[in-house]
Amino acid sequence: MAKEITPRSQDYSQWYQDLVIKADLAETSAVRGCMVIKPYGYAIWEKMQQALDRMFKDTGHVNAYFPLFIPKSFFSKEASHIEGFAKECAIVTHYRLKNAPDGKGIIVDDEAKLDEEYIVRPTSETIIWNTYRNWIQSYRDLPILVNQWANVVRWEMRTRLFLRTAEFLWQEGHTAHATEQEAIEETLKMLHVYEQFANQFLALPVIKGVKTANERFAGAMETYCIEALMQDGKALQAGTSHFLGQNFAKAFDVRFTSKEGVQNYVWATSWGVSTRLMGALVMAHSDDEGLILPPKLAPIQVVIIPVYKSEDQQKALNKYATKIKSMLELKQISVKYDNRDTHKPGFKFAEYELKGVPVRIAIGPRDLENQTVEVARRDTKEKSVYQFVNLDTKIENLLNNIQQNIFNKALDFRDNNTFYADSIEKLNSILDSTGGFIYAHWDGTSETEQKIKEITKATIRCIPLGNQQEMGKCILTGKPSKEKVIFSRAY
RNA sequence: CGGGGUGUAGCGUAGCCCGGUUUAUCGCGUCAGCUUUGGGAGCUGAAGGUCGCAGGUUCGAAUCCUGCCACCCCGACCA
């Protein structure tokens, strides 16, 4: 029979895995914790890349590329940075293999030991700031607005496809500025870019906020994030933007001479999103029949499926389909005409639903006669008959409509799963029943946050930007609190 | 990294406890042919296996033992 997907209600985590594998997004590999991103999944990632890259360029950034390997000594220059990453690093210690003396296979050549080991980058701040030292002398060299698309490695103990893998793809922006204010503005600007991207392309509403000290990036003064809510009520950090202060500039001695002739340390930011967004995309919108992709990220936006009995009918439908296809392509819509005669229409319907193709057009002899098509939308499963006239505009509108509808649905879900807890018991009971974003008062200390985490397994996802200031009592300690923060269990 | 589970054809599985008519079961998929085609087609025939890998015990190992690899769940950890 067909590809069975575990229902969401039965086992959410299994449902997610089934989708990723059966929709052909990715699979596990022979290497622990590392995945193979398959062509269909990679096509979605490429669409994300294109959209983001355009947004980066539009905000004045340029792309560059830095090495995969980082000398160990670079790593230890920023104290909190190394502390944050030390436990999950892959290390290169040798550069050569040799035949085993017993003739069985090959072994590491002990004589080829590196004097200084290399760390496979878990992030690139250190190698980049070591490089920036040479790029920056004067205020005239600033700002530097560089992004790189790269892979990074974090030796995770427990992995899940896309959500947490030992190797993953991402972009990391690294900027250098003359003033603190300019760096902070950059940090927030890129956070805004991420929000726009999430809203407009992922069709995913997110909350912009600032992380607490516990959740802050190793080496940052302040970490900002966008947080999204998944269908099982768990939160997912979808992107981060860090204000790094002068930490890395001081660690790598990156100074510039100001207009006034004074030597100052440079101010820094870094920001990134990763293939984890693929996981967010799947978990935010999809259902028990398969993926639901927002049209703006769907590799195939419209699929045309012919239904015929005779060869003559097939030929006539081929012509009709080709006409429709070129008409839609003129509107920059990506169309696939699936004229395989090895599969029945019903099979194809199910297959494209599994793969999340937003719009399906079915054409048969009846349509040919009436100059109509049957249009089915993936998000609502509604079917309707469209006249051929102005089909291109109608489909274009439909795609926009679907994009918007998916976003609205996710927004409704989040609104319906946003709560307020005035006690630790309330917080816990909400977490155990529905999950979601839960606003609660907190006394502002790391100790309290830690204790709440131990009791409820929930963390503070963020303190929302522009948060309403209102006095209250911490749900754990009863100490005064000036605002509510968002708690959630998280991926 | 600790605890638990899993690994048999492309996928899902029976067999394992209690070693021996087992030339390893069944379903889906694959291939060939015919009939089909408006929601996952039917019939007939065929191909497809280092039983995760490596050792060991034994006359004999998918089955018992040891080590390793990978995956899943829980925990610890995690920008």
Image (spheres, rainbow, N blue to C red):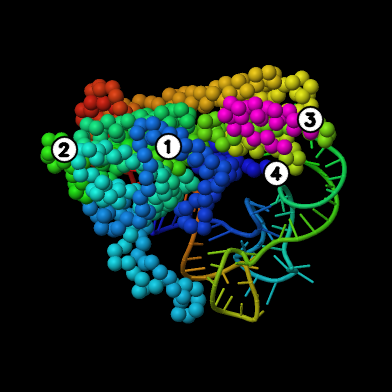
Q: What residue does disc 2 label?
A: A258
Earlier in the chain: of badge 2 and badge 1, it is 1
Q: CA distance from mark 2 to mark 1?
A: 31 Å
Q: Quadrant of residue A193?
A: top left
Amino acid carrying label 3: it is Ala
Q: Quadrant of the C terminus of chain A?
A: top left
Q: Position of residue A452 (x, y in %)?
A: 30, 38
Residue A294 placement, left or right of B42: left
Q: Are marks 2 and 1 on the same chain?
A: yes
Task: Give the main secondary structure of the magenta stretch.
Answer: helix
For label 3, the SS is helix
Residue A239 placement, left or right of A134: right
Q: Which mark is residue A316?
A: 3
Q: Position of residue A415 (x, y in %)?
A: 43, 24
Amino acid carrying label 1: it is Asp
For label 4, the SS is loop
Residue A230 placement, left or right of A425: right
- Give the magenta-colored segment's residue range: A315-339
Q: What residue does disc 1 label?
A: A53
Q: CA distance from mark 2 to mark 4?
A: 71 Å
Q: Position of residue A276 (x, y in %)?
A: 44, 42
Q: Nearer the viewer, residue B17 or A177?
A: A177
Earlier in the chain: of badge 2 and badge 3, it is 2
Residue occupying the point 59% across, 32% down: A334
Q: CA distance from mark 2 to mark 3?
A: 73 Å
Which label sits in the foreground, 2 or 1?
A: 2
Q: CA distance from mark 3 to mark 4?
A: 31 Å
